[in-house]
């Protein structure tokens, strides 16, 4: 249960959490959330829980920023898959449609969770241009283009979550972010297989998607923790690059995702 995981993480980094939460016990936290949910509270249990955390951890601006950054990407992915599934003829019945239906469910669940956790601090959903400012004009009419852009989105998401993880160290939301990250990686691998490619990335290979070089830039690293892995294993550089994914900074991700976002 996600709330259980969050509470476990809070206790690890802050043994006095329940004193912060107005002297309630773990049992009372769950009882309160359950009662709110059963009464049909407008905000729902996740928002009630977020409100409690806001009181206990006021000022965690970095965490709010990271979660809203993640929410922006999840909004984009959810929009991409919802629109694709709604477009007649783009994803006919078959394995691809089945896969994208499941991915869409995941992305919509991620949006709901992040919005619930952020409460009134959650940003509004932006307006998106899925053609990437005209770079992919047939993204909603060509299956091949749609799947290619899907791959680029998922590969970006994996590296984006990895890049933000250090900012969440010692916070109660790190585990949840990592749970989302691993699912995004499964999406990326599955979409790559749909296109006929391996589930992992070799060096900075874009797998024949023009204009997405930034998504794969810097993913050819063969030195990890200061150790040249190729030199100590004799394994080829190509294979070593496949064995490790590199993070992307927030700035780099925003440059990649920026053309999808319509500025007001």
Image (cartoon, helix red, strand yellow):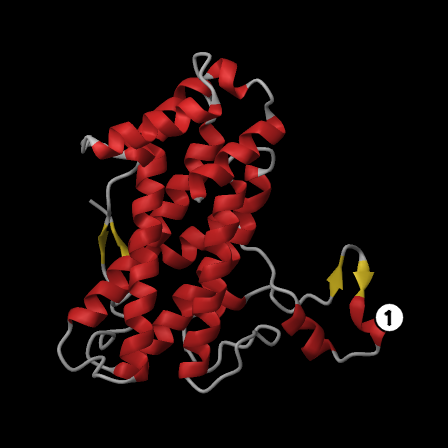
Residue 134 image position (x, y, % from top left): 25, 69
Callout 1: helix, strand or loop? helix
Describe residue 29's horizontal placement relative to residue 217 as left or right: left
Query: Could you say which is closer to the camera, residue 263 or residue 96?
Result: 96
Q: Is residue 60 left or right of residue 245?
A: left
Q: Where is 19 relative to 62, above or below? A: above
Q: Quadrant of residue 81?
A: bottom left
Residue that appears at 66% across and 70% down = 243
Q: How far from the left and from the top, in percent, is residue 185?
A: 49, 64
- Camera sees residue 252: no
Residue 101: % across, % down: 27, 70
* Res 45 → quadrant: top left
Image check: 14 left or right of 89?
right
In this view, which residue lies farthest toward the left? 88
Q: Is residue 225 left or right of residue 36?
A: right
- Residue shown at the point (20%, 83%) measured from the top left: 92
From the image, tell me which residue sits under label 1.
Answer: 232
Q: Position of residue 41 (x, y in %)?
A: 20, 30
Which of the pair 48/111 is nearer the observer? 48
State the residue at coordinates (31%, 40%): 115
Image quadrant in which the C terminus is located? top left
Asked which quadrant contains residue 12, the reply is: top right
User: Which residue does the image show at 31% across and 72% down from the upper left?
Assistant: 100
């Amino acid at each position: 249960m996600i709330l259980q995981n969050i509470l476990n993480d809070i206790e690890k980094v802050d043994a006095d959490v329940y004193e912060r939460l107005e002297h309630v016990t773990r049992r009372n936290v769950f009882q309160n959330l359950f009662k709110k949910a059963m009464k049909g509270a407008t905000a729902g249990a996740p928002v009630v829980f977020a409100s409690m955390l806001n009181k206990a951890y006021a000022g965690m601006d970095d965490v709010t920023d990271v979660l809203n950054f993640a929410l922006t990407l999840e909004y984009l992915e959810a929009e991409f898959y919802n629109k694709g599934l709604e477009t007649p003829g783009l994803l006919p019945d078959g394995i691809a449609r089945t896969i994208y239906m499941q991915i869409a469910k995941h992305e919509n669940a991620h949006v709901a969770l992040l919005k619930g956790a952020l409460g009134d601090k959650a940003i509004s959903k932006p307006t998106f241009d899925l053609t990437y400012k005209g770079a992919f004009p047939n993204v909603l009419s060509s299956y091949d283009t749609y799947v290619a852009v899907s791959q680029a989105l998922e590969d970006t998401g994996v590296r984006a979550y990895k890049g933000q993880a250090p900012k969440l160290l010692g916070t109660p939301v790190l585990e949840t972010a990592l749970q989302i990250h691993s699912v995004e990686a499964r999406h990326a691998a599955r979409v790559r297989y749909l296109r006929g490619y391996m589930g992992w990335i070799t060096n900075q290979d874009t797998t024949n998607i023009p204009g997405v070089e930034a998504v794969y830039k810097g993913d050819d690293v063969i030195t990890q923790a200061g150790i040249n892995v190729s030199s100590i294993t004799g394994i080829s550089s190509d294979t070593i690059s496949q064995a490790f994914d590199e993070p992307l900074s927030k700035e780099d991700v925003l440059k990649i995702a920026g053309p999808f976002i319509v500025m007001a």
